[in-house]
Each structure stands twice: as C-alpha cells, then as structure tokens.
Amino acid sequence: MSSDAGPSSVSEAAPDPGDGAPTAGDGAASAGDGAATDGDQPRTQTEAGRSGGLLAPAVVLVVVAALAIAAMTGGSSSDEAGGAAAPTAPVSTDPPDDLAEDLVVEPDPQQQEAIAEEQVSPEEARAQLDALATRDPDDPRALGEVDAPVVMIEWADFLCPFCGVFARDTETVLIERYVDTGLLRIEWRDLPFQGDEAFLAALGGQAAAEQDAFWEYHEVLFEADLRRDDGRMGRDFLLAVAAELDLDVAAFEADLDDPALAERVQGDAVLGQSLGITGTPAFIIGGYPLVGAQPLEVFVNVIENAAIEAGAELP
C-alpha cells in the first residue's frame, strides 16, 4: 500500500500531543512497554517500532477500514476492510491450519492501487475507523452503554498471554472507571492467532454469548492464563467452564459445533487482518488505533482524549 493513501506518520493519525494525547513524555509506552503476541513469543514495542503502541502505518489502516472492506464485500461501515499494509512488526499470522485461507484476505491489486490514490484527511480517516463500532444493543459481547461517548473495539485471543495481562490488569480498571460511569463501551472481536485451540476458545466465547454469559466466560478463561499447547484447552475444559457458569451445558456443546458461530469468529478475524492487525491485543479507541498490552496510563490518555473530543465530561 502506498503511503499516498494518507499521512504516513503516527503523529498525523493520533491525537495532537497538545490535546492530551499519549506521548513519550506524558505516560505513553516507550519501546518495550507493551507487547502483542507473536505466535508463542511476545513482541515488544521495540520490535514493533512504535512509540506509545499506536498501530502503524496509522492512517493507512484507517483509510483501508473505510474503503477496502466495502469494495470487497459490499457491506456496511462495520464490514469495511481489505488490503491494508501490515504493521512492520514481526508478529504471527498463523491462524488454525484448516482455516488459513478463510482468515487471510488477498485484496485485488487494482483495488489496492485505487485505495492508494484516495486522499483522506486524518479527521476523515479516524471517523472511518470509529464507524467500525457497531453499537448493537443486542450484542452480548459488548459491555457498556450503546450511546457511550467512546467505543473501544478490542481484537483478542483467549490464549494470547498479553491479552490476559490486559484483561486482568488493565481492562478491569477501565471497566470500573469508564464503562461503569457510562463513558466507554467495549466491543469484543475474536482474532485467534494461537492455533486451533485458540479458535476453539473463541467458539466457546460465542457459545457463552448465546446464553448472555460472554463476559463471565471471558473472566474465567483469562484468569486461567491458558497458553497454546499447554495441554489444558479442549472441549472438556470448555464444558467444565460452562458448568461452572451454570450454563445449559448441552446447548453450549451443541453451539461449539454450530457453523454459524464459526463464521462469526472467521468474520471477526478477517476484519482484523484486513485492517492490518497482525498481533493481539489490538484496539480501536474512538477511532484511534492502539496495539499491545500498553500500560494503563496509555489507555487512560487515549480514552479521555477521545471523550473530550466527543464533548463528554470526564468522571
């Protein structure tokens, strides 16, 4: 993807430092502070080459979100994707072997050229990414008010160690401070990079969501601190989780084999990959992309800056 698609630097896509955005001097992550998974190995921000964890190339990702998915699928704004230049970090792009073709988008070269010729301002670009939030009132994998001023879209993997760090150490604080006060809404998206076991765990999340228990499932799995090939993840483990959560275990097990739920997981993953996301966790917060289990203050700065821009009062 040519950088002609829009400004190529993170600073052009991210909040202006003068507006309270995260910078190296005000609490943003320096190299190595945050990480996203690279298969079995974490990748640091040094490897990512990104100060503060903002996804790169920032505006290229935003432009593609608006233009390429719509061109590929004919879908609505929440289905817009395709053809983003991947971040420069060496992260895993290995989905479950039997689903690799389904999870990897191969955009048409002519389409990429057309996208590269588009001139989109940083403001327009950010609005296109923010529009990926569905704000669906019936979404059981969303947490927070539908009309919250800021939406954080989270792509994650239940077997990703840094997703676990974020869920246990940071997300709990964000929920108490911002979700419970009506400022923030979180929308979960599956991106199971850690192989077939991760895909099964994602299916379990979908099955739990069918019984309005996604976030309870989310808490149990991340507290278990599962890892790829550690011998714990499997159908028996998930059925035990369903029983622990007092779910209808028979219905839960049947949903694990439901092709419609597998398609939902695939859809989340395809969207994430076509935005150029190649590691987890990754986020879009009020239109601003962020990657890795960054320190709490980075999320605080981005969320509060986005809230102020939306005209909201901080709690």
Image (tube, rainbow, N blue to C red):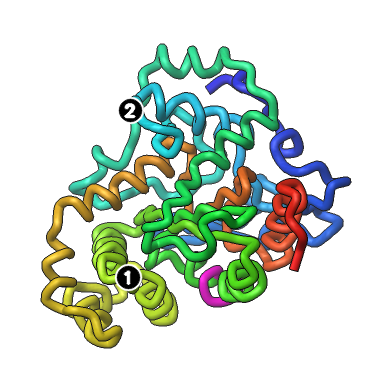
Dot 2 corresponds to which residue? Answer: 73
Residue 24: in magenta span: no
Residue 153 drawn at (x, y percent): 51, 53
Residue 109 position, x and y percent, is: 40, 16
Q: Is residue 59 shown above or below 291?
A: above
- Quick check: is 167 in the magenta stretch? yes
Q: Position of residue 137 (x, y in %)?
A: 42, 56
Q: 209 above or below 137?
A: below
Three-letter amino acid code at the position of disc 2? Thr
Task: Give the residue number, with chain letter if any, for mark 1.
Answer: 212
Q: Amino acid at mark 1?
A: Asp
Q: Quadrant of residue 182?
A: bottom right
> Which picture quadrant has residue 178?
bottom right
Instruction: State which tag comes first along the sequence, 1 or 2.
Output: 2
Using residue 30 as the reference point, say whether residue 47 is left or right of it. Answer: left
Which residue is rendered at x = 58% and y = 30% of the image?
60
Question: What residue appears at the point 59 percent right and 57 percent down from the top-left corner?
Answer: 148
Q: 155 or 260: which is nearer to us?
A: 260
Secondary structure beneath dot 2 equals: helix
Q: Distance from label 1 to label 2 (Cα)?
A: 29 Å
Residue 281 visible in rendering = no
Q: Is residue 163 left or right of residue 15?
A: left
Instruction: Magenta stretch: give its range.
Output: 166-170
**In percent of the image, x 38 and y 67: which residue is there?**
159
Give me the residue at 69% from left, 30% from top: 122
